[in-house]
């Protein structure tokens, strides 16, 4: 099956023989999405939604790694949503993964309140004022809060989750205080946190978080996740996450 458009390629996900269609000129998934998929817990029979799914990487990986029942992805950019749908079809997963084109700010209106046991997101890390805007619109929307804010993601996640449902997020540590504050505000109690360090002696550049809708206060801080043991060589744990 080859339904590639100009500039696209097929990459092997190293999981269950799954593959994904990507366009390097637009946006390819990064390590943050892979690490989030390794941090998320989806139990047998649960339904899971990824907010801002891009080319569908997180629903694809979670469908390979877990016994979840149904997976959905919400993506506002038409081209990215089309990429995700074609990747789902490439892997013959239409019965298990649904890609919806729509706005995160209206996610609970699209899917209905209390519709999912698990909601995940790898949202834009930068506010509209942060950094240098990328001239490519697809990359700009993926990296900066142009079409949705962190509060939009957390508010809609709280509405989408069943009571006791779980929220998973990968983000940058410099916004950690804001993230935790918003989670508590919308009654998603932070339960697990893990900081990701590029090297053992470097400060963290990612944070993985799990929250429980309506949970009681008590958060576990897990041991740091180290990416590289030396330049160009992943640690054993990272190798396991990637499935090499």
Image (cartoon, rainbow, N blue to C red):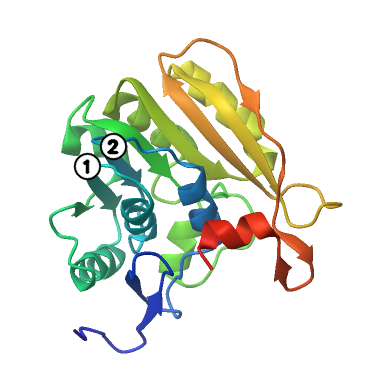
What residue occupies the far left of the structure in this picture? Answer: 95
- What is the crowding at mark 1: few (fewer than 14 residues within 10 Å), some, or many (at least 20)? some
Asked whether residue 29 appears in the rendered view, the answer is yes
User: Which SS class for mark 2?
Assistant: loop
Residue 163 percent across, percent down from the top left: 31, 17
Task: Please indicate whether residue 219 sits to the left or right of residue 59 in the image.
Answer: right
Task: Please indicate whether residue 56 sits to the left or right of residue 180 in the image.
Answer: left
Would you say the residues marked 2 and 1 are in contact, meaning their CB atoms lie under 8 Å apart?
A: yes
Compared to 156, does 72 lie above or below?
Answer: below
**Is 233 in front, or is 119?**
233
Residue beneath disc 1? 69
User: Which SS class for mark 1?
Assistant: loop
Which of the numbered marks, if any, corresponds to residue 189? none
**Is 134 in front, or is 162?**
162
Residue beneath disc 2? 44
Residue 28 percent across, percent down from the top left: 46, 70
Compared to 61, does 137 lie above or below?
Answer: below
């Amino acid at each position: 099956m080859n339904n590639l458009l100009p500039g696209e390629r097929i990459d092997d996900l190293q999981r269950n023989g799954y593959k994904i269609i990507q366009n390097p000129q637009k946006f390819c998934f990064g390590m943050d999405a892979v690490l989030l998929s390794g941090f998320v817990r989806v139990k047998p029979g649960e339904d899971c939604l990824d907010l801002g799914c891009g080319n569908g990487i997180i629903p694809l990986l979670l469908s390979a790694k877990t016994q979840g029942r149904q997976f959905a992805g919400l993506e506002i950019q038409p081209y990215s949503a089309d990429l995700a749908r074609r990747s789902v079809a490439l892997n013959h997963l239409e019965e298990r993964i649904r890609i919806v084109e729509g706005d995160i700010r209206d996610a609970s209106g699209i899917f209905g309140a209390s519709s999912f046991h698990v909601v995940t997101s790898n949202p834009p890390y930068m506010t509209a004022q942060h950094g240098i805007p990328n001239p490519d619109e697809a990359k700009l929307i993926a990296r900066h809060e142009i079409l949705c804010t962190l509060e939009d993601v957390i508010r809609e996640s709280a509405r989408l989750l069943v009571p006791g449902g779980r929220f998973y997020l990968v983000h940058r540590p410099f916004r950690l205080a804001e993230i935790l504050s918003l989670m508590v505000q919308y009654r998603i109690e932070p339960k697990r946190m893990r900081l990701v360090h590029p090297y053992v002696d470097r400060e963290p550049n990612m944070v993985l978080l799990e929250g429980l809708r309506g949970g009681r206060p008590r958060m576990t801080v897990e041991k740091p996740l180290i990416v590289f043991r030396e330049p160009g060589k992943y640690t054993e744990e990272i190798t396991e996450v990637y499935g090499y």
